[in-house]
Amino acid sequence: MIKTLVKCIRDATFPAILTPVFVLAESLIEVSIPSVMANLIDEGITVGDMNSVIKYGIILIIQTLGALFFGATAGYTASRASSRFARNLRADMYAHIQEYSFSNIDKFSPASLVTRLTTDVQRVQMSFQMITRIVFRAPAMLIFAFVFAFRTDHQLSLIFVCVIPFLAVVLALIIKTAFPIFNKTFVAYDDLNEVVEENVHGIRVVKNFVQEKSEINKFRKVSERIFSLFTKAEKTVAYNAPAMQVSVYACIIAISWLGAQAIIASGNVEGMGLTTGGLMSLFTYTMQILMSLMMLSMIFVMLTMSKASADRVVEVLNEKSDINDGERNLTEVKDGSIEFKNVSFKYFKTAESNALDHIDLKINSGETIGIIGGTGSSKSTLVSMIPRLYDTSEGEVLVGGENVRDYNIEALRNNVAMVLQKNVLFSGTIYENIRWGDENASDEEVQKVCRLACADDFIQSFPDKYDTYIEQGGTNVSGGQKQRLCIARALLKKPKILILDDSTSAVDTKTDAMIRKAFRDEIPNTTKIIIAQRVSSVCDADKIIILDNGKIVDFGNHDELYANSEIYREIYDSQTKGAEEDE
């Protein structure tokens, strides 16, 4: 875990190194102050020597200003280092997530990734700042104060040695009990974010079904779980404070009693035994030592909390994409031909059955292929193999005569445009959204693909036309408009293969026919694969695939399938019967 996180320090290295240097200087000055105070009392105040009072007073002022300077500088460098570290960590995580395959993404929920990128990184940032500052300050103060206390009176300083084992046992018990609870808390945070994200995205459905109270109760239930877990963890951590207070007061009482006896026994004779100033400095060292121990205990508690967050962050960073560039790293796709050779696929290695089962299929470049089948028949899974959104479990997929595993992934996906079943638009203008297909495309090129996708008409009706701002998720356009914009975005890539995964379901049949006609006339050399629920969307395709339970049960053109495929005939008749009756 540490090895992975250290890689993200980078430009935070210099301030991270400077911080402990300033902290050590600050600690050394602070620990030396009680000794000067003792001299001020013994050599100045007690004997009434004003010259000594002035001398040691000036020294104290200089020490205080020095400690203030080094403390403020250490705070600045620690904050700068931790901020840079968190920025690098968040950027590395986000960039790494972009490299995930679909199967990698399936391992993390969106809410969990959001929590890891925000809350977990923030906790790791706080721990990093603590490590560069307090983790050095507490042991330094502890060691320096103990050394100075030992110099003042080595017998009384042994009192601290008796307290340390007691605090160590209490701290160990706290960490052992609290750590599992904090782990559960972070998982509960994922659930909370998921509830919020789901509600915000589906707020229209919530209101349509009047489920506001149900959603509030769901949120309250998760929130109460987090509250309960945190309360339980904080109760455990709270034992640290009374244990520390008992130790502080016990040390003060013991030093007061034994120190007073030592002063009386020595008669407070100069140069003999413990002096009044020495006793006062011991009280200060007692507070410094025990405060250092308290800081150490809090460090362990905070690191215990942040370790759970660090594990979750590192889990994202260490997740390796199972889809990488092929060894041959081919960058040119010759044509849009596709071939499936004995392809089988399962989403999980432990799955009992295949999502795709021994698929053999050959598609010529430029053909239009329709795919129909019932829900769950793996239509989307089949086409996901082409741009390597998933990799086959068995067999191989060829594009342009080459195995897709041999291609450079970016080159392959630039030649395979896929309009997913769930259409997604991003916040920005229509121009900006369409240019996802080609960021360098001219306005004329954008408008041309929008005309092909039958989107230009409704865009022209907007007051700002192509500069119309699309809200996040495309909430200010209709479902059919969103689909046509997504198709235009895919067309702008000028792909050799175009895949439409049920992406015209929200448009009327007339517009659907116009889009398919534009495809035939304008991009005849592009291989087009159309997944549809409406048989009318695929009946004019060169070939139609009938999928059932991950297997190709029929394959042919409309006339062949209507004559020989009972499934196709039943689907076609059931969907066209009503239209014929209306006529």
Image: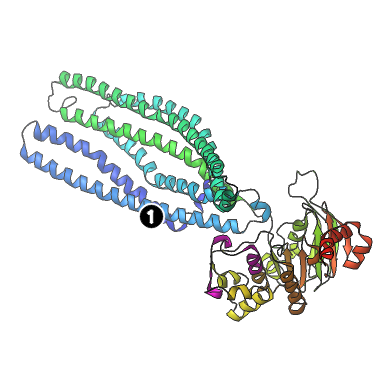
Asked whether the viewer can see residue 557, the reply is no
Determine crowd level at label 1: few under 14, some 14-19, many 20+ residues with C-alpha closer than 10 A: some
Is residue 55 visible in the rendered structure shown here?
Answer: yes
Q: Position of residue 292 (x, y in %)?
A: 34, 35
Image vertical order of residue 344 relative to residue 217, above or below: below
Position of 315 relative to 579 (above/below): above
Give how far across and how far down residue 516 sits, in percent.
75, 72
| Magenta extent | 464-486
Give SS at disc 1. helix
Q: Nearer the viewer, residue 527 or 346?
A: 527
Q: Residue furthest bottom?
A: 444
Q: Residue drawn at (64%, 75%), measured in percent from left and top?
A: 450
Quarter of the image that includes the N terminus: top right
Label count reads: 1
Left or right of 569 in this view: 266: left
**x, y percent for residue 79:** 37, 52
Question: What amino acid is at disc 1?
Answer: Arg
**Residue farthest along the front direction in this orientation:** 582
Task: Point out the image quarter for the C terminus.
Answer: bottom right
Closest to the observer: 482 or 507? Answer: 507
- For image coordinates 73% across by 62% down, the residue present is 501
In the rendered view, does 202 fall on the left or right side of 130? right
Q: Residue furthest right?
A: 564
The residue labelled by disc 1 is 80
Q: Main secondary structure of the magenta part?
A: helix
Q: Quadrant of residue 239?
A: top left
The quarter holding residue 554 reads bottom right
Residue depicted at 63% across the width and 67% down the height: 481
Query: Whole-percent x and y of residue 41?
Result: 13, 33
| 306 w.r.t. 319: above or below | above
